[in-house]
Amino acid sequence: MLDVKFIRENPKLVRARLKTRHSPVDVAAILELDERRRAAITEGDRLKNARNEVSKKIGELKKAGQDTAEIQRQTREMGEQIAALDAQVRQIEDEQRQLLLSMPNLPHESVPAGEDAMDNQVVREWGHKQTFDFQPKDHVALGEALGLFDFERAARISGAGFPLLVGLGAKLQRALIQFMLDLHVARHGYVEIAPPYVVGTAAMTGTGQLPKLAADMYHVPHDDLWLIPTGEVPLTNLYREEIIRAPLPIKLVAYTPCFRREAGAAGQATRGLIRVHQFDKVELVKFVAPETSYAEHEALLADATDVLERLGLAYRVLLLCSGDMSFGAAKCYDLELWAPGHNGWLEVSSCSNFEAFQARRANIRWKNPQGKTEFVHTLNGSGVALPRLVVAILENGQQADGSVVLPEALRPYLGGLERLVPKT
RNA sequence: GGAGGGAUGGCUGAGCGGCCUAAGGCACCCGACUCGAAAUCGGGCGGGCGUUAAAAGCGCCCCGUGGGUUCAAAUCCCACUCCCUCCGCCA
């Protein structure tokens, strides 16, 4: 959510920056409402002040034993006017808040203007793409031969698009989770959190999933709760409605499952693990001082890429253009792994700086060194998402005989196992 | 699921229609004392909105949330939410 005051003072800038995003925003309507809001508040405050004065006098007169019936009648009328104005203010504020909640964040000046994914910039590539002297298989073929998944039975249980890992497939995923958590805690200084996976409407609104993305999420109507689409939601909401007293930055990491309806994704490449309704993820979230947020953003990116480098997987970093960024982001990098079986790149992480966008919605503040209360900046990034990481490990490590050589860094988490071998 | 108790400022805790512009204590900040510190003493110490170019100042609002009664509500009434204790069920 943007600051109305900022919009009021910089309407041209806001219009220009938002033009490069895909949300049509009626800046004029917001400003007009703001005008009316402030007029009603000023008038209401004036009346309230008058009433307070009179009420005080009534108390004094009564104590002196005088008759106050007439003056009370007049004050009563004043009270009705005040109530009407208050109702008007509330209604205007509701309307204004709705508009503001559906307004995306302003892109940072370092973000290229652009329409869609075609306009994203490749910032850098790391590692070399694996080559083979045989025709590489995709993860579905590899996983089936190795007995790692069972999509058919998963569909019988939950319908299409839910993963089911078996044996070493399940263990491989668990090893990766542990490897990533250990890395972020021990080397990168994050505090590990095990949060709720189901959250209330206020939490979803705080991080910006609601109201816009309601149709993309699983909802439990009986309790009015939502299944989290990302660990970002419970982690960022950890400090909702708080003035943080602990020193910044605060760095949190959590493993969580994520649930997404993928309502609009039909027809896309949906085979196997690449796009599923439920997946696991290790998520990084930071609460930082505003002046440091772009430096912290780069550090966050480095924490995420460290995972990939330690696993020896080729990746590239994309700087998203204004039109391809998620709703709340001011700046965002995507990390993509090379997947030779698909002969393409797979997104495994988004590292975003939200500036004060989420903090303002969720009311997360701190006291800066000058003693002033202000909104923090929030950042988050996947560190990283699991299914596609598994895909990349399988496809990159595959051998001519159908076995898969595992990354060295992972072996301690698999009891020293060096490769996965097809069942005979 | 059943029964009871509670929600006041960063924490603790008084207040139960107008003197609440919310006492006292703790924590924190500044100053004095001190070679320095502790102790002690003095002062400061919530948030939001409006007004303003901005600040100061001034005004309005906030005692879990939302309504109501009243000239006037932390205080009275209603509803809701959350927390705690006990019982039941249960990983």
Image (tube, coloured by chain):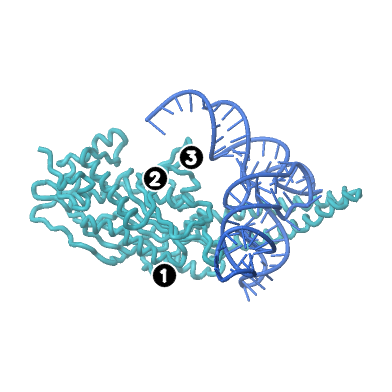
Q: Earlier in the sequence, mark 2 or mark 3?
A: 2
Q: Which residue is drawn at 28% across and 41% down?
A: A163
Q: Which of marks 1 and 3 is nearer the N terminus?
A: 1
- Say which chain is cyan: A
Label 2 sits on residue:
A194
Chain for disc number 2: A
Q: Nearer the viewer, mark 1 or mark 2?
A: 2
Mark 2 and mark 3 residues within 8 Å of each other at the beta carbon: no
SS for dot 3: loop
Spatial CA span between label 1 and label 2? 35 Å
- Say which chain is blue: B
Q: Residue A109, labelled with which disc?
A: 1
Spatial CA span between label 1 and label 3? 39 Å
Q: Residue A199, labelled with which disc?
A: none
Chain for disc number 1: A
Circle 3 residues within 10 Å: few <14, some 14–19, many ≥20: few
The x, y position of residue A349, in whole percent, is 32, 55
Q: Is residue A150 left or right of residue A204?
A: left
The x, y position of residue A388, in whole percent, is 26, 50
Q: Does the image show residue A56?
A: yes
Chain for disc number 3: A
The amino acid at mark 1 is Glu
Q: In which quarter of the image is the C terminus of chain A?
A: top left
Q: In this view, does A192 lie above or below A329?
A: above
The amino acid at mark 2 is Ala
Do marks 2 and 3 share a chain?
A: yes
SS for dot 2: loop
Label 3 sits on residue:
A224
Q: Does the image show residue A211?
A: no
Q: Which of A165 and A319 is in front in this view?
A: A165
Do marks 1 and 2 share a chain?
A: yes
The amino acid at mark 3 is Asp
